[in-house]
Image (spheres, grey):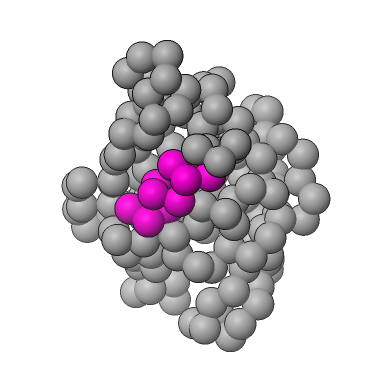
Amino acid sequence: MATNDTRITVSRRIDAPASAIFNVLTLPQRHAEFDGSGMVRSDEKAERLQKVGDVFVMNMYADFQGGDYTMYNHVSAYDKNAMIGWKPAQEKSKDTPGGWEWLYTLNAVDSETTDVTLTYDWADVTDEELLPLFPLVKEDELEESLNRLAAVVADA
């Protein structure tokens, strides 16, 4: 685990092949199952993520947002079975991500075991109204996301 002023990174070993984990991460309809923050509710019928530039829409909930809201996630990293990342954009500016990124890096230890690293990076947030809110998700919630991801993959 590593934390600095604009990034939190957590890692965990998951007893599953990188391909199985990547399969779950690239299906937005599965994201609520492994969200450790409790904010992700459902997707808007997104297809499997296939490349940088794909956009998927998530229905979210948070008290600080006044309840229900929508995020437009722009795929920013894609390397099959190795990495997937996205940068969220708020509904009012859905074509322009707000400067934070979620990045999952998968490192196969062997054919049945993968080290998974989740990085939450807000270094590029420039909106003066949003900046004081970061980090919106805490380290223990990121760790919970990886724990839930391990459980989801184990049940697959």
State left or right for residue 80 relative to residue 1.
right
Pick whichever, 30 or 50, lies toward us. 30
Above-or-below relation of 25 to 106? below
Number of numbered discs on residues: 0
Residue range (magenta): 143-152
State left or right for residue 137 relative to residue 68.
left
Pick whichever, 122 or 67, lies toward us. 67
In the image, residue 105 lies at what x, y percent? 40, 31
Measuring 59% from the left and 74% from the top, which residue is drawn there? 61
On the question of residue 6 being in view, the answer is yes
Above-or-below relation of 150 to 98? above
In the image, residue 25 lies at what x, y percent? 56, 38
State left or right for residue 93 relative to residue 64.
right
State left or right for residue 1 relative to residue 98.
left
Pick whichever, 29 or 102, lies toward us. 29
Which residue reaches farthest top? Answer: 111
Which residue reaches farthest front? Answer: 155
In the image, residue 88 lies at what x, y percent? 56, 54
Above-or-below relation of 15 to 155? above
Measuring 54% from the left and 22% from the top, which residue is drawn there? 19
